[in-house]
Image (tube, rainbow, N blue to C red):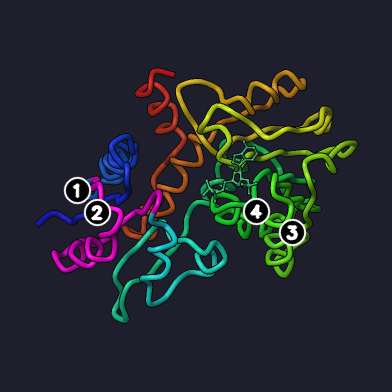
Amino acid sequence: MTDQYAVFGNPVSHSLSPWIHARFAEQTGQALHYGKQEVPLEGFAQAVRQFFADGGLGLNVTVPFKQQAWALCASRSRRAESAGAVNTLLMRDNGLFGDNTDGAGLVRDLQQNLGLELAGRRLLMLGAGGAARGVLLPLLDASPADLTIANRTPDKAVALAREASSSGPATACTFAGLAGRRFDLVINATSAGLSGGMPTLPDGLFTAEGAAYDMVYGPRPTRFMEWARKQGVTRVHDGLGMLVEQAAESFLLWRGVRPDTGCLLDELREHLGQ
Ligand code: ATR
């Protein structure tokens, strides 16, 4: 039987992961099949058990199951522990192992693909939900000068910054409290864009060379990206590169070989008609 991998989510029909992993497999000469499965909201644990009992080798996990995946694991990577969420599963001798490749994917996209320096830079993270928590540790591991977490509900930013502060210089702020401050990189990790919105932010948040990154992607630039351009930012990016890079990290974990993501990202943009 061909080695089996899949992504579990709900909904999952629009997932690009099967396309990405099929291209990785082709490129690296690996024989595998990567499918997608819409799992019932109450049936995640059962579906995971069944997948591995049937000989499956690895799973990606997406919305809304990443926390449940974390809870199912017998052991986890440091970055999965910190994220409180798991997006990559594999079976080890002692049971299910969980990793979270989202943050590494983001950092790799920022540094390798976009050429953005993180070490010594001032970073701003918008949002303090699951998406923000999932990437904090790898961002702090990249040694920024500081990382400010700003959130609509300030208490959540304070709690997240307190948790992260043992790993690096993380502090919390309200959106209004950002007025007058300047950042080298502003990352939008809120879900506001999903409903066509964006956080209410003061003007002038960017340094002269400052960049803006939205962790989501879509056929059109998000409101946050449009706002950043109006603020005079030229380096404005969506999260498609992060998607490809987190997939490459999962592929590396499962197959022991890192695919070449550079050309694939261009191909994917073409595939999506961007
Ligand atoms: P996710 O897993 O996508 O991070 P989440 O855990 O529900 O989802 O977190 C959503 C994040 O987007 C939160 O930081 C939320 O702010 P609150 O904590 O104040 O709810 C933020 N968010 C969602 N819609 C927003 C909006 N319109 N303006 C600002 N922040 C928003």
Front in this rendered view, residue 250 or 151: 151
Residue 225 locus on image (x, y percent): 63, 26
Q: Which amino acid type is shown beneath numbered disc 1?
A: His
Query: Within 10 angstroms of label 2, few (less than 14), some, or many (20 or more) residues?
Result: many
Labelled pair 1, 2 in contact (Cβ < 8 Å): yes
* CA distance for labels 4 and 3: 17 Å
Query: Within 10 angstroms of label 4, few (less than 14), some, or many (20 or more) residues?
Result: many
The residue under label 2 is 5
Using residue 87 as the reference point, say whether residue 81 is left or right of it.
right
Q: Which amino acid type is shown beneath numbered disc 2?
A: Tyr
* CA distance for labels 2 and 3: 38 Å
* CA distance for labels 1 and 2: 6 Å
Q: Is residue 45 magenta?
A: yes
Q: Along the polypeptide, which appears first: circle 3 or circle 1?
A: 1
User: Which quadrant of the rendered structure holds the N terminus?
Assistant: bottom left
Q: Along the polypeptide, which appears first: circle 1 or circle 2?
A: 2
Labelled pair 4, 2 in contact (Cβ < 8 Å): no
Front in this rendered view, residue 170 or 207: 170
Vertical placement of 152 versus 169: above or below?
Answer: above
- Tell me the element at label 3: helix
Q: Along the polypeptide, which appears first: circle 4 or circle 2?
A: 2
Using residue 111 as the reference point, say whether residue 102 is left or right of it.
left
